[in-house]
Amino acid sequence: MQFTQMVWKGAAGKRVGFGVKDRLVYAWYCPAGNTPETPAAFKANVFPAGNPAHCIDDTVNVCYNKRAILAHNDARARHGAPDLTYDRAIAKAAQTQLVEALGSCTGSAAFTGTTRHQRPYKYKDCGENYYQPMNLASDDLMSTDAATQQWLDGNQYWDFNAGGAVPGQTAAANLQANQFRTMIWKGTNIPAGTTHDVGFGFHCGTVLAWYCPNRPTKSNPRETLLNVCRDDGSCADSAYICTKDGYDSCYNEMALAAHNKKRTLHCSGSDFTSDTTMAKALQKMLNDKQE
């Protein structure tokens, strides 16, 4: 009866309060659950976890979305990032893409390659994470908590002082590190007052998450240092990290990428390569002039 009181659906606007003393906890639920105590009432108000009949809203699994957002926001708070906000339109678009790619869950289709990157144009600036189990599964909410945990576990492959994946690792480790980055991206590059929206597609045990607007700028390492923070909320000192070698390595990397992009556009032949000795000499000349 304690379980049914806790999960009783009832009417909207339910309230709860907790009293705690030593190891004793009391909870009051208003209006009360378990009322009336009839089989019909229990059938109408107590459901199995993740019951599809009560989770699907216009193709979107709202149960999974709520569960994933709670887990994400708990992790993001520890890493100094603001809460994500559920966006039904994003979730529906992600759900549609998953269903079209995977079908009825009975085959062996893989949500990879081109099928994974065909986001609608309006979501082109969104970050993306995906998770697919070894075998396509039914939509069991308990088993697919593995998606959120896998992305979060990518922190073991992330170098917080360098603003990127730890060098020399496997492709799988690099992918997991970047999934972690996308999941807890703080968003200092997003205009103030902008909500951090998210929607999850959930089909065949596979999860597709779109974070909008939340796409990290790969060519700006200083930005990454400020937006991917440790689990105590502290971020790397980008001014020190970028200039500790006698020149601004972050600016050099960003400017190099921008130059080569323009060179490609104008058919200028081979890309520039970075010359750290030249950059250090130029930086020293500038510093000496200012003194």
Image (cartoon, grey):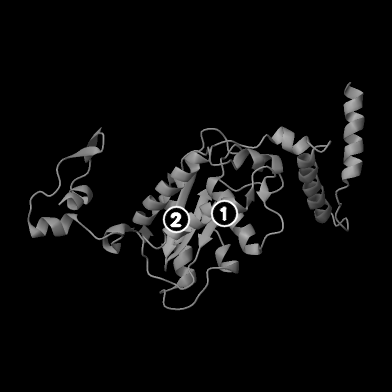
Q: Is residue 65 left or right of residue 1?
A: right
The relative height of residue 117 versus residue 290 in the rendered view (above or below) is below
Q: Is residue 118 left or right of residue 208?
A: right
Determine the residue located farthest toward the front in the rendered image: 22
Q: Position of residue 225 (x, y in %)?
A: 66, 40
Q: Is residue 67 left or right of residue 240?
A: left
Taking the spot 52% from the left edge, 60% from the top edge, the residue there is 130
Q: Residue 200 bears which disc, if any?
A: 2
| Circle 2 Cα neighbour tier, 10 Å, few/some/many (<14 / 14–19 / ≥20) | many
Taking the spot 62% from the left edge, 53% from the top edge, the residue there is 157
**Considering the numbered disc 1 on the image, is that residue within a helix, a strand or a loop?**
helix
Taking the spot 12% from the left edge, 50% from the top edge, the residue there is 34
Q: Position of residue 274 (x, y in %)?
A: 85, 48
Q: Residue 154 bears which disc, if any?
A: 1
Taking the spot 66% from the left edge, 63% from the top edge, the residue there is 170
Residue 116 visible? The answer is yes
Determine the residue located farthest toward the bottom in the rendered image: 107
Task: Name the amino acid, label 1.
Answer: Gly
Mark 2 or mark 1: which comes first in sequence?
A: 1
